[in-house]
Image (cartoon, coloured by chain):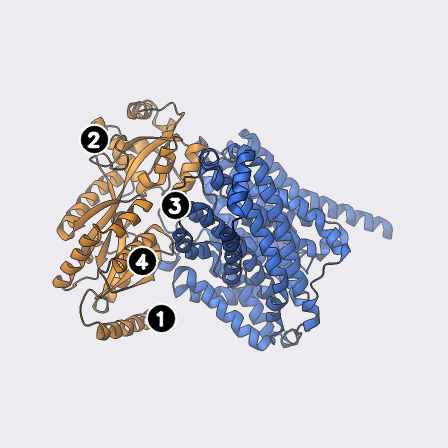
Chain colours: A orange, B blue
Amino acid sequence: MKYFIAQFITLIFLCTCNLYAKPMQHIHFLIPGGRDGGWDITARGVGEVLTKSGLLKSVSYENMSGGGGSKAISYLIETANTQKNTLMINSTPIVIRSLQKNFPESFRDLTLIASIITDYQVLAVRHDSSLNTWDDILLAYKTNPKGLKIGGGSRRGGLDHLVAAQIIKAAGADPKHIRYIPHDAGGRALAGLLSGEVDVLSTGFGEVFQKYQSGEVNIIGVTASLPVKEAPMIPTFKSFGVNMSFVNWRGFFGAPGLNPKKVIKMRNTFKSMLSTPEWESVRTTNGWSNLYKPGVELKTLLINQEKTISSVMRELGFL
Amino acid sequence: MFEGVMLGLETAFTLQNLMLVIFGCLIGTFIGMLPGLGPMSIIAIMIPVAITLGDPSSAIILLAGVYYGAIFGGSTSSILINAPGVAGTVATSFDGYPMARKGQAGKALTIAAVSSFSGGTIGAILLFMFAPALSSVALLFHSAEYFALMVLGLTAIAAFAGKGQVGKALLMTIAGVMLATVGESALFNAPRFTGGIQDLQSGMSFITLAMALFALPEALYLIFDPKKSETGNSAESIKNLRITKDEAKKIAPVIARQSIQGFLIGVMPGAGATLASFLGYGVERNIAKGEDQAEFGKGSIKGLAAPETANNAACTGSFVPLLTLGIPGSGTTAILLGALIALNVTPGPRLMIDNPAIFWSVIISMYFGNVILLILNLPLIPYIAKLLTIPRNYLIPFVLFFTMIGAYIGQNNATELIILVALGILATIFKFAKYPLAPLLIGFILGGMLENNFARSVNITDDISFMWERPMTLGLLIVAVLMVIIPMYRQSKARKAAAKKEA
């Protein structure tokens, strides 16, 4: 079956290659998850902006879910020589999951094109919570770590858990005793916070921003290094003297061994896309922040992220 | 509040918005009829259209129309070809499909339309009256209560076990719960029972399983049993849409009960239409007496009306946490929330104060969507039901085709097809061995949620004391136990009475 699909896609590519001899006429987005997930929304948003703004002639999408993205990664590597126009979208989980040995490959096996957006992580509490400041939370954790229930939308050992642990670790406390309450999605975790089931919520900035604006949720701190443009009032953890930052980036990867000239062309396309008005409207409706880091810069970011995450995971006993 | 209602009426009854509801209902019904395309995907498809409208009221009015249409469309495929594309209409097929097989497809669709209409309407009225007050109730539910709610849902299985079948039904339930544990749990990041197959890492897909359990075995069964295949439905019986007075009397109390019960279940974030329809079916079967009860599963109009009423009422109920708390209770309402936010509307306690026109026009258009659905669909039913007059040997390939497409669409993953066929064959064998398949699917759907909420509750309290320390959890669990014991008690009493008579 895989062979058949590969052949079929090759056939499509042969056709498109003949029709459009010039490069950067077409990008095929490989989305490692189902419809309407975060990856899907981002890739389709980007594709639409690219074609609307005239930076790209045509675009196609392919959803390939399975194994939390591992299926798409191994598919991209196995069929590399037929994937000259294919870009896979991915994000921080590619780092976490390869550390967990969910798949044997890592970002090093792919061609790093560029990251384009990021969401920051936050710690949030109910507006009427007795924990009003970072100091309150830290003190509560230090006096009785088991009594502080930290909820999140990811599994144990997933993004929300690890970031909460990273913050606590950077503040000089032992993250081993974190009582993390996992939920199946950010929305459910938010409901858990509002119903009083958990005391603190570790989640993405975008997930709670609306609730923050309506005043139901108080955001304690954000993991950005500098205050976020949309909400400059929210302090960063750095401003508390907690030396940590975390970006939940999203970006594009190509098959291994892509033609360098083509890679540069792709990067330039994304770079010019970020300053179009079409992108600006997509970006603001989704509450994303731009984070353009091409090639080597992205690699440095990923290597650093891998280092921090693996040390936190080791301390929590996940590695 | 009254001013807000008037403002909402004005907004909802503009020509443009009326056209949008009609358009939305039509699109939703037709796409919803294809198995595998549930309300979630259809709404996702329609979101770009809605957003280009610019006006948030119009956008949500269109999407609400699509939502209702899709749910009705889903019931149609459950009834006609036994292929429920959405979890919420699984229970519809239990009695709807047998009715269609008996040549009462037209009547079944009418009952579905009428019950959906009533459920939706009563739900909309309840929403209208209690939305502001109910928002605080939804937040009382912690994981412990959800766990108890899932247990209650599983007791509905007692309703599917015919005489001497309790053991078989239980076995299938356990199989379903076991299937739900395949893949990563929502709590830990490690794959379980995947046999090293990557495609199973995120678990089995509901749609694949539903198709494998209902649509495929049915089609295969008909092939193996050619005598059954020849019973084409005469055109006359399909045209017969009318519900007799007796029948109306029979289903009226069911509709009344299930509208309220379904709505209340829908209000709880996360429970939703699926649980409402299963519980509705279970409760009605337990309440029914004698012959009525025996009729369940063989084409009972009560058994059809109950889940249809409940799932529509629950859909309406799920707007309570969405509009008043800004918490999406289901996948579908999560998508609606995304659409609202994209239009710069923030649902939450302040919506009713800041944007009364939006708040009330959504509620009014929901009611209106129900009316339109009834007006549009009743005349269309004979044409929809004609599908069944197609000779079986032409229909079966189509059923197989749509089943395959349905399983593939959701994930775009060809392995789903292999899983589908493998499970389908297995399910056919079960069917020949007279094992009920519905409990398996219910176990599967509720099993995942059961596990998550149980594990989370244990995580929070460190032991299982939450089962008796939280009054609401305890209450729900007691009801669950009663749901199992009462029918057993009744049966043994009936048996004793029968024995006495003989003596």
Q: In this view, does B270 lie to the left or right of B79?
A: left
Q: Which residue in the protein does label 4 denote?
A: A31
Q: State the CA–CA distance, disc 4 to disc 3.
A: 26 Å
Q: State the CA–CA distance, disc 1 to disc 4.
A: 19 Å
Q: State the CA–CA distance, disc 4 to disc 2.
A: 34 Å
Viewer-nearest residue: A133 or B158: A133
Identify the residue at horizontal 69%, vertical 63% (top origin): B241
Q: Which residue in the protein does label 2 denote?
A: A238
Q: Which residue in the protein does label 3 denote?
A: B343
Which circle's residue, 4 or 2, is located before the other in the chain? 4
Q: How crowded is mark 1: few (under 14 residues within 10 Å), some or many (20 or more)?
A: few
Q: What element carries label 4?
A: strand
Q: State the CA–CA distance, disc 3 to disc 2.
A: 34 Å
Residues tagged 1 and 4 counted as in contact (Cβ below 8 A):
no
Identify the residue at horizontal 35%, vertical 56% (top origin): A33
Q: Is residue B496 above or below residue B238?
A: above
User: Could you confirm whether marks 4 and 2 are on the same chain?
Assistant: yes
- Nearer mark to the viewer, of 3 and 2: 3
Instruction: Tell which subunit mark 2 falls on.
Output: A
Mark 3 is on which residue type? Leu
Image spot of residue A22 (x, y percent): 17, 69
User: Can residue A86 be spotted in the picture?
Assistant: yes
Instruction: Tell which subunit mark 1 falls on.
Output: A
Mark 2 is on which residue type? Lys
Q: In which quarter of the image is the C terminus of chain A?
A: top left
Viewer-nearest residue: A258 or A181: A258
Q: How crowded is mark 4: few (under 14 residues within 10 Å), some or many (20 or more)?
A: many
Q: Which residue in the protein does label 1 denote?
A: A1
Mark 4 is on which residue type? Ile
